[in-house]
Image (cartoon, rainbow, N blue to C red):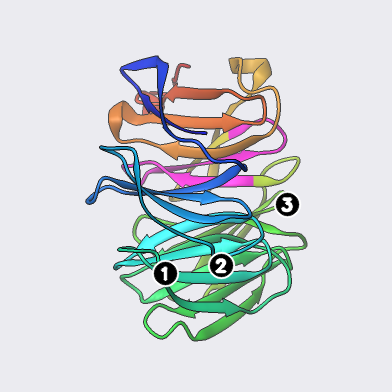
């Protein structure tokens, strides 16, 4: 199921779509008020959020769809067989297919300002592509296990990566992705990274059940949100979304819950659930 939630009325979700298989990835197109749904083993569905009607669909893979990103009228989809599928956002027609690994493509980051896009794979590599030509520019042996998440800093200076090896790594984009930091950030796999709207912080979450808040300038750990200290999640935390709406951080977990964390007082060393 795909469900829409109103933070002013969080007890009642609104069903947007129901599909027969699991959904691992979504991509919101705010200007069009549309949603792209990654329907595992079936492909992509483009949904009009106002009418909840399907506009178009595309059977791009018989595998998992781990991530979807949008940029300049194009949709990038990372699949479980290692293929990256590039489609038109208008009708989901396929524009290109790229396969540089036999292992799963897990995560995508796109940077229009610096004309590249990056993909993290389960062969432990990050691969960098030209945004206009889609030519492979660089292969980075980034981690010792699968790369699960990539995120660009708000000024596009750094590319952050998180892996099943529990390391958080920072790469200097302008120095052709030279390594800057390598941090043992969690006990188990890092599943998601996201920046705060004000660019001052970023958050990571992990299979170790915790969420961690970091100083974005110094890459220093500031806060740990977990079950013991803050009644956090009971199992793996899989995805984060940091909203400009009152500085809420949204987290979701294998424990089937979504938590909303109020971080508006983070500068004052305080936050509430």
CB under 8 Å between callouts 2 and 1?
Answer: no
Residue 150 visible in the current orientation: no
Give the CA distance from mark 2 to mark 3.
15 Å
Quick check: 186 left or right of 51? right
Point out residue 267 in the picture as x, y percentages from the top left corner. Answer: 38, 29
Give the CA distance from mark 1 to mark 3.
29 Å
Q: Earlier in the sequence, mark 2 or mark 1?
A: 1
Q: Earlier in the sequence, mark 1 or mark 3?
A: 1
Q: Which residues are magenta?
A: 191-211
Quarter assignment of residue 247 = top left
215 to 69, vertically: above or below: above
Q: Which residue is mark 1?
A: 87
Helix, strand, or loop for circle 3? Answer: loop
CB under 8 Å between callouts 1 and 3?
Answer: no
Which residue ends up furthest to the left in the rendered image?
A: 31
Give the CA distance from mark 2 to mark 1.
16 Å
Query: In this rendering, which labeled residue sits more in front, label 1 or label 3?
Result: 1
Residue 164 badge: 3
Query: In this rendering, which labeled residue sits more in front, label 2 or label 3?
Result: 2
**Local crowd size for mark 1, using a 10 Å CA cut-off: few (<14), some (14–19), many (≥20):** many
Q: Which residue is mark 2?
A: 119
């Amino acid at each position: 199921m795909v469900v829409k939630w109103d933070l002013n009325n969080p007890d009642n979700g609104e069903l947007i779509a129901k599909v027969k298989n699991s959904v691992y990835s979504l991509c919101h197109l705010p200007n069009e008020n549309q949603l792209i749904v990654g329907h595992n083993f079936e492909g992509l569905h483009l949904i009009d959020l106002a009418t909840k009607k399907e506009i178009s669909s595309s059977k791009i893979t018989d595998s998992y769809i781990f991530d979807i990103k949008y940029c300049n009228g194009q949709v990038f989809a990372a699949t479980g067989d290692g293929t990256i599928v590039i489609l038109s956002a208008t009708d989901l027609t396929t524009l290109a297919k790229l396969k540089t690994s036999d292992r799963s493509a897990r995560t995508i980051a796109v940077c229009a300002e610096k004309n590249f896009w990056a993909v993290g794979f389960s062969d432990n590599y990050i691969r960098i592509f030209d945004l206009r030509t889609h030519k492979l520019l660089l292969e980075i042996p980034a981690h010792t296990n699968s790369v699960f998440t990539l995120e660009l800093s708000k000024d596009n200076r750094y590319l952050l990566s998180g892996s099943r090896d529990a390391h958080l790594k920072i790469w200097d984009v302008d120095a052709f992705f030279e390594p800057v930091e390598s941090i043992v950030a969690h006990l188990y796999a890092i599943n998601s990274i996201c920046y705060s709207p004000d660019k001052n912080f970023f958050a990571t979450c992990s299979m170790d059940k915790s969420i961690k808040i970091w100083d974005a300038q110094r890459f220093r750990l500031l806060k740990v949100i977990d079950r013991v200290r803050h009644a956090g999640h009971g199992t793996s935390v899989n995805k984060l979304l940091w909203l400009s709406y009152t500085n809420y951080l949204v987290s979701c977990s294998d424990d089937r819950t979504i938590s909303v964390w109020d971080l508006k007082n983070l500068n004052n060393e305080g936050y509430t659930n």
